[in-house]
Amino acid sequence: MGMAWRGWLAGALALLAAAALSLPATAAGVKNASPYWFQDSYRTLDYVNTGPRTTAIVDTAGAGTVWLPPLSADDLAYAPSYVGADIFEVGTASGVQGWGYNGAEMIREPFLDVAATNPTGVAFLDQASQGVRLAVSTLGGVGIYAWNGQQWAAALNISAPGTIGVAAGAGGGVLAATAGGFTLYSPAGTQQAQVTGISGLRGITSAVGGSLVAVWTATAASFYTWTGAGYVALPSWSEPLPSGGTLLGVAFFRGGTGYWLATPTQVVAYGWNGATLTQISGWSSTAVPGTAVAVSPGWAAGSVVLLSPAGVQYLDASGGALGVDGARSVVGQSWAVFSSGGILYSAVLPVGHDVDEVKMVDTMAALPSGTSLMYWVSTDGGGSWTETPPMVPTDVPSGSSLVYQADLTTDNQAQTPVLDITDLYEIQTQTTTDSQAVSWLLP
């Protein structure tokens, strides 16, 4: 049965790759309350050279980025009807995994997978004229994949640093969200429109060919509509956050006539009657297990899906109230929801003389409860390390090849330490007149 099912699904995707446009199912991801990535930016400072044992700033120029936590299994997308098969994709730490419904149960289908390191979002695109397409976002940008009859094949890569979510956009384009807003890219990958100034954005989703867009922070959702030239706010669509903690995301109804708001313990549905939004009790539930990390619409009207580290729970309201559809659910998984730590390494700093005492100076934008930040310095190019608490002069083994690391940790998927600036000071006699230091700045 497995081989026959896979052949049928592959055939259905191939035959319907250019079918008529329909409504896209997009991802609803969970992001940190303060989702930042860190990058280097240079400034020139002078050595302090007032005598022996003075403080001197050394060059801490670094390369690379760090994201804490690098979330996984926090996004899922259900295929729109024109695809012709009931399939969904879920982002995991090792990449995007595909599943299909064979009429009796959900079957894991590796040929639907997409290789991606720590994907931050996944969405089917409303590009039926170009075939069945899937967008996968990472912190580097968005990759677009086309179905070639056998697997997803890379079709386009859009560079967009800091991308935390992806959705179908207007005109067959794609929407890439960052911590401060979202950008619409055309099917060819060129920037078409942008919305900025949204502090702490955690995810994005869309409906009706990308003409309706929802983004959310930890405490509220905002809605936008496409005018043909740009996205404008729809304040009349906003409703208060339901109880139950952090907002996990928004899931539009298939026809774009309403949406669900989800927290870890409940989902609340609101329908648009042409003038106002009204809560739909039969499509709502206050009995969510409390382990959900994301939400998505299902395939049928009135069906909504919750993602957790253990799988997906498919809820259907065809009987008048939301109930679990076991056949369309997936259980027994062990998807990691977030990584509890991230490390930022500086470049190796060839100082040109031996260093035996240093001091790390930092500026923390946020250090919420349950999070921590530790620094380590090496004087032998990374062979051995000495912990260097901030603002504390620390003896280190004598050496001339400095490198430092910042270890960021959290025990809460909704919180992350936020680091503004780090400076590494050398404590010794120094006669050099100037040097460069790097500041690890928020984007």
Image: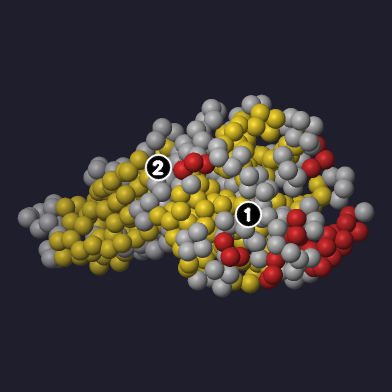
> Quadrant location of residue 15?
bottom right
Q: Identify residue type, mark 1.
A: Val
Say whether disc 1 or disc 2 marks the residue closer to the N-terminus.
Answer: 1
Q: CA distance from mark 1 to mark 2?
A: 37 Å
Secondary structure of the residue carrying numbered label 1: loop
Residue 75 horizontal/vertical position (percent): 61, 48
Neighbor class of circle 2 (other Cα within 10 Å; few <14, some 14-19, many 20+) is many
Q: Position of residue 213 (x, y in %)?
A: 54, 51
Q: Position of residue 48 (x, y in %)?
A: 12, 56
Query: Looking at the picture, which amino acid does disc 2 mark?
Result: Pro
Note whether 159 is above or below 217 in the view shown: below
Q: Residue 417: which numbered mark, if any?
A: 2
Frontmost residue, 307 versus 295:
295
Q: Quadrant of the N terminus?
A: bottom right
Residue ID at (61%, 31%):
279
Residue 296 appearing in the image: no
31 left or right of 337 in image: left
Helix, strand or loop at label 2? It is loop
- Mark sitting on residue 208: 1
Question: Split into 4 quadrants, where in the image is the C terminus?
Answer: bottom left
Q: Is residue 340 above or below residue 224?
A: above
Q: As rendered, which of 393 and 434 lies closer to the eye?
A: 434
Determine the residue positioned at 69% across, 40% down: 304
